Image (cartoon, rainbow, N blue to C red):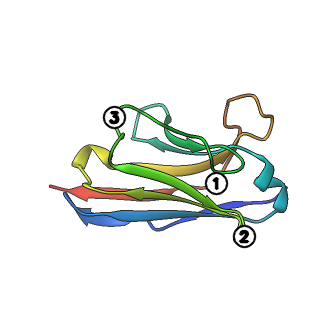
Amino acid sequence: QGQLAESGGGLVQAGGSLRLSCAASERRFLRYSMGWLRQEPGQERELVAAVNWNGETTYYADSVKGRYTISRDTAKNEIYLQINSLKPEDSAIYYCAADTLMSGKYDYWGRGTQVTVSS
């Protein structure tokens, strides 16, 4: 079925930056819109950023606009999330996901990478 493998999470101080990466194992993921979602304990997953198949259209949740940047490298079949000016409330597990049904919903997930921001 293929895999989405996230990396780049870690422990960082408030105000710092991280770059999350998502490596897609199959070329079919190049056709899909891709998103980054995050989940805090006891909370539902929240879509924070998304990019369409060719990288020309992006979406950001209001809470992250101006600090998060999503991008994709079609040659490497990777998706990135640059996070700047990190805040403690950004702490969560971040998941890379694909909209494989092209429905506007993200239905195929990676295992996630933990981001923890200390104050």
Q: Quadrant of the C terminus?
A: bottom left
Q: Residue at 43% of width from left, 34% of height from top?
A: 61
In the rendered image of this protein, does residue 27 appear above or below residue 103?
below
* Mark 2, secondary structure of its residue: loop
Q: Earlier in the sequence, mark 3 or mark 1?
A: 3
| Cα separation between marks 3 and 1 | 23 Å
User: Mark 3, mark 2: which one is toward the viewer?
Assistant: 2
Q: Is residue 25 left or right of residue 9?
A: right
Q: Is residue 99 left or right of residue 44?
A: right
Q: Which mark is residue 75?
A: 2
**Disc 1 crowd, CA 10 A, few/some/many (<14, 14-19, 20+):** some
Would you say the residues marked 2 and 1 are in contact, meaning their CB atoms lie under 8 Å apart? no
Q: Earlier in the sequence, mark 3 or mark 2?
A: 3
What amino acid type is highlighted by mark number 1? Gly
Q: Residue under circle 1?
A: 110
Q: Is residue 22 left or right of residue 84?
A: right
| Cα separation between marks 3 and 2 | 30 Å
Q: Residue at 39% of width from left, 49% of height from top?
A: 68
Q: Nearer the viewer, residue 44 or 96?
A: 96
Q: Nearer the viewer, residue 28 or 40?
A: 28
Q: Residue under circle 3?
A: 63
